[in-house]
């Protein structure tokens, strides 16, 4: 292994876990911590008025990036709360008339766990499988949605494998069948064009820190016409149209608003740049290493995501080998466990291949020089580990790993 | 997860990586673990006619702790008799490498690999085996 300058920080390639705040966003936020500290709900004086005006501008900026009216944007603490509010809120409001939810096995844990919770309350939930490329089968969705279905919740872009579900088709199907369509767009906003009207989206979860905004804020789009109604999770002063009480965190609202405005202005050029860097990373690795496989569809995919299986090397061992890179094996939320990623297993990947995967997340501050460095670093680490992998040795000797009787432990 | 300095040392400078010929009568091979579980260790011992382990080699598919555990035991078994080698306990390995609780299974696997290699050698050299040297 090459000696590594340990004082140097690793190259950040984990933009699906979180992103740094854009300095332009921070600049906009700073005054709202100190001199402009008013409560946006204070109606009696100038401190409140200026804060309210700024928060409403931020609301417009968030709405604009998804083609929504500002009045349809509810600020929350993040995408996890937005997903909870959308799913539990709709389920609880329409309980009695409807008791069924449809979602997908590869959704984020906060959607799946919310659905499990509702099952304990007596709702029934259908978890749609995905095809080997990570996309759902629309015919299976069609069959799953009944007149008892209150909500269909399908994420736009997957956090691990970056695949993009056919939102417009799903939206049209839900509208036709009379079920609300919620989509977790934490990974998608600002990365790809989204339009709540063209796509017939009724509820959409948005995250601040995935789009170079601050952590601790997100938003939920809630359609007004036809109106979607929710039972709130948090009761109180009735802020956010009664759907989410609590004083708005003015600096964070301004941060997510500015982050959306920047993303909207730069999205097209940035997507092109990231796609080219991502393709450079993949081509560079595959030119130098055999037996490297892409997980998830390459066509319908976030431009900044790459998820690779490096056959015959174990992912956690590989992460230790690529210590100059900040990457993820499995998702950050589940990497504390030793189980292979449930998303990769849902694609039908064998457990041994799921164990060999790394996720690369490229973003706004990723450079070509970093990608070239990453390619060499990965190739070196994989070669080092393969040289000490008994599975690679067996593969080289022509032994089929699957034909071996392994003692599962 | 942060690894101990000893784990990092064994990971970056693994001792005795490689393979002996499986058909060599003086070699015992232990292959333990499973790819689906994320750990496979191959440990080989080369035994003298006097029953002393003269050399050892390993190859491991797994995390840093699994690689370090198997690298460490190749050092430990050298110079030992078969019975002495089979006495090595996973707790000794875990303690030497300061493995955290979630990585104890790596040391267990390394202990299993030693036992499997010793058993394989003994099986090969059982009396009555016509092919014995």
Image (cartoon, coloured by chain):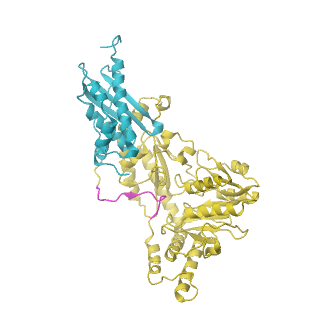
Chain colours: A yellow, B cyan
Coordinates of residue A114 in the picture (x, y in percent): 60, 56
Work out whether residue B122 or residue A123 is closer to the camera in this orientation and state it.
A123
Q: How many marks?
A: 0
Would residue A317 be visible to someone looking at this image?
no
Q: Quadrant of residue A156?
A: bottom right
Q: Is residue A349 above or below residue A138?
A: above
Q: Is residue A345 above or below residue A173?
A: above
Work out whether residue B56 or residue A124 is closer to the camera in this orientation and state it.
A124
Q: Quadrant of residue A391?
A: top left
Judged left or right of residue B48, residue A270 is right
Coordinates of residue A76 in the picture (x, y in percent): 56, 69
- Is residue A381 one of those drawn in magenta? no
Coordinates of residue B122 in the picture (x, y in percent): 33, 20
Q: Is residue A21 above or below residue B90?
A: below
Coordinates of residue A396 in the picture (x, y in percent): 41, 32
Residue depicted at x 33% and y 17%: B125
- Is residue A9 one of those drawn in magenta? yes
Work out whether residue A310 or residue A270 is closer to the camera in this orientation and state it.
A310
Q: Quadrant of residue B58?
A: top left
Q: Main secondary structure of the magenta part?
A: loop
**If the image is split into quadrants, where does the C terminus of chain B sit?**
top left
Region of the chain picked out in magenta, as a range: A5-19
Would residue A117 be visible to someone looking at this image?
yes
Judged left or right of residue A258, residue A324 is left
């Amino acid at each position: 292994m090459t000696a590594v300058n340990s004082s140097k920080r690793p190259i950040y390639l984990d933009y699906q876990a979180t992103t740094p705040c854009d300095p332009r966003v921070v600049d906009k936020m700073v005054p709202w911590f100190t001199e402009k500290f008013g409560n946006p709900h204070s109606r009696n004086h100038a401190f409140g008025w200026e804060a309210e005006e700024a928060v409403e501008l931020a609301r417009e900026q968030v709405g604009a990036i998804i083609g929504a009216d500002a009045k349809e944007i509810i600020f929350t603490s993040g995408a996890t709360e937005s997903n909870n509010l959308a799913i539990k809120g709709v389920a609880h409001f329409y309980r009695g008339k409807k008791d069924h939810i449809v979602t997908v096995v590869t959704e984020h844990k906060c959607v799946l766990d919310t659905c499990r919770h509702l099952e304990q309350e007596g709702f029934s939930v259908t978890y749609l499988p995905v095809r080997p490329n990570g996309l759902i089968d629309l015919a299976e969705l069609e069959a799953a949605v009944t007149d008892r279905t209150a909500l269909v919740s399908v994420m736009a872009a997957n956090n691990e494998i970056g695949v993009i579900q056919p939102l417009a088709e799903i939206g049209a199907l839900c509208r036709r069948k009379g079920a609300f369509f919620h989509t977790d767009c934490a990974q998608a906003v600002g990365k790809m064009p989204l339009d709540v009207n063209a796509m017939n989206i009724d509820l959409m979860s948005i995250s601040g820190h995935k789009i170079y905004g601050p952590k601790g804020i997100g938003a939920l789009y809630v359609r007004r016409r036809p109106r979607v109604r929710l039972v709130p999770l948090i009761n109180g002063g009735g802020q956010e149209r009664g759907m989410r009480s609590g004083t708005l965190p003015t600096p964070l609202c301004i941060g997510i608003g500015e982050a959306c405005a920047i993303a909207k202005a730069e999205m097209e050029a940035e997507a092109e740049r990231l796609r080219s860097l991502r393709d450079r990373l993949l081509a560079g690795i595959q030119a130098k290493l055999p037996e490297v496989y892409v997980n998830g569809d390459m066509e319908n995919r976030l431009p900044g995501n790459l998820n690779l299986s490096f056959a015959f090397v174990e992912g956690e061992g590989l992460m230790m080998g690529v210590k100059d890179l900040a990457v993820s094996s499995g998702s950050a939320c589940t990497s504390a466990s030793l189980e292979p990623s449930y998303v990769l297993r849902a694609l039908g990947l064998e457990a041994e291949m799921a164990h060999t995967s790394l996720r690369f997340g490229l973003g706004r501050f990723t450079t070509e020089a970093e990608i070239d460095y990453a390619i060499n670093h990965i190739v070196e680490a994989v070669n080092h580990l393969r040289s000490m992998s008994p599975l690679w040795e067996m593969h080289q000797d022509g032994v089929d790993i699957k034909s071996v009787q392994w003692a599962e432990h | 997860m942060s690894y101990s300095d000893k784990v990092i040392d064994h990971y970056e400078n693994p001792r005795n990586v490689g393979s002996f010929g499986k058909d060599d009568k003086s070699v015992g091979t232990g292959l333990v673990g499973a790819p689906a579980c994320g750990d496979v260790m191959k440990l080989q011992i080369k035994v003298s006619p006097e029953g002393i382990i003269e050399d050892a080699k390993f190859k491991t598919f797994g995390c840093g702790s699994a690689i370090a555990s198997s690298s460490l035991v190749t050092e430990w078994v050298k110079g030992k008799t078969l019975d002495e080698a089979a006495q090595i306990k996973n707790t000794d390995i875990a303690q030497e490498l300061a493995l955290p609780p979630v990585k104890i299974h790596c040391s267990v696997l390394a202990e299993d690999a030693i036992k499997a290699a010793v058993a394989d050698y003994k099986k090969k050299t059982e009396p009555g085996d016509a092919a014995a040297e």
